[in-house]
Amino acid sequence: MNRSTKITNIKDFFSRPSFRSEDAEKRGVSRPLLQHYVRSGQIERIGPGIFCAPNTEIVDDPSCERMIRLTYAIPESVVCLVSALTLYELTDRIERQLWLAVPHSKFAPRIDGVRFTRFRNMDVGLSSFKIEKYKIPVFDLERTLIDSFRLLDRESAIKALQLAARKEPLNVRKLSGYAKKLRFNITPYLLMVTT
């Protein structure tokens, strides 16, 4: 089978946000052949072993497009921390990189512009966020706030909590439950923003 015939084996992947080299190999398209397709412009490489259809936009916002493509291609990845705060409109930080959580036991690939954080308790607060027709995995608002206190600077975390409290009533029970599971004392900060 020649190169031009083999590309038809992966054309149905072009309807997805992205696909992995493992997916292509199952269809008889080797990694060197994928590289040939990248060089000839027939597919686009967006990360190590991660590809998509060339010159396609799946959503209007380029930062959201990257988020969708990568969460789709990296199994068990979840949008977290600064990227999740951005989705919930709880930060004014300019997002220079995409923040993704992966299970602690999982290998995190090196991808330019992506900051991987290895988490335990990946099921705590796991939710989804809809961007146009795509659903991406993200930690819910309460888990994101707790993680912000645990892993970001205090100023950013307090500001996010204050913004969240102004937008809608905080789910204090949920926040406290997550804080207990993730071993962080949120009580002083809750008192600060609710009194």
Image (spheres, rainbow, N blue to C red):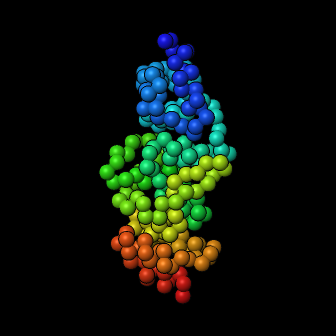
**Front position in the image: 21 or 149:** 21
In which quadrant of the rendered image does the C terminus lie?
bottom right
- Place of residue 139 in the rendered image (x, y in percent of width and height, measured from the top left): 49, 61
- Place of residue 147 in the rendered image (x, y in percent of width and height, measured from the top left): 43, 65
**Front position in the image: 170 or 115:** 170
Q: In this view, does 47 lie to the left or right of 128?
A: left
Residue sitting farthest toward the bottom: 195
- Place of residue 50 in the rendered image (x, y in percent of width and height, measured from the top left): 48, 35
- Place of residue 80 in the rendered image (x, y in percent of width and height, measured from the top left): 48, 58
The answer to whether one can see residue 148 in this image is: no
Q: How many marks?
A: 0
**Front position in the image: 153 or 53:** 53
Q: In this view, does 56 lie to the left or right of 142?
A: right
* Residue at left offset 58%, top offset 37%: 16
Residue sitting farthest toward the left: 105
In this view, 4 is above or below 95: above
In this view, 160 is above or below 36: below
* Residue at left offset 44%, top offset 45%: 75
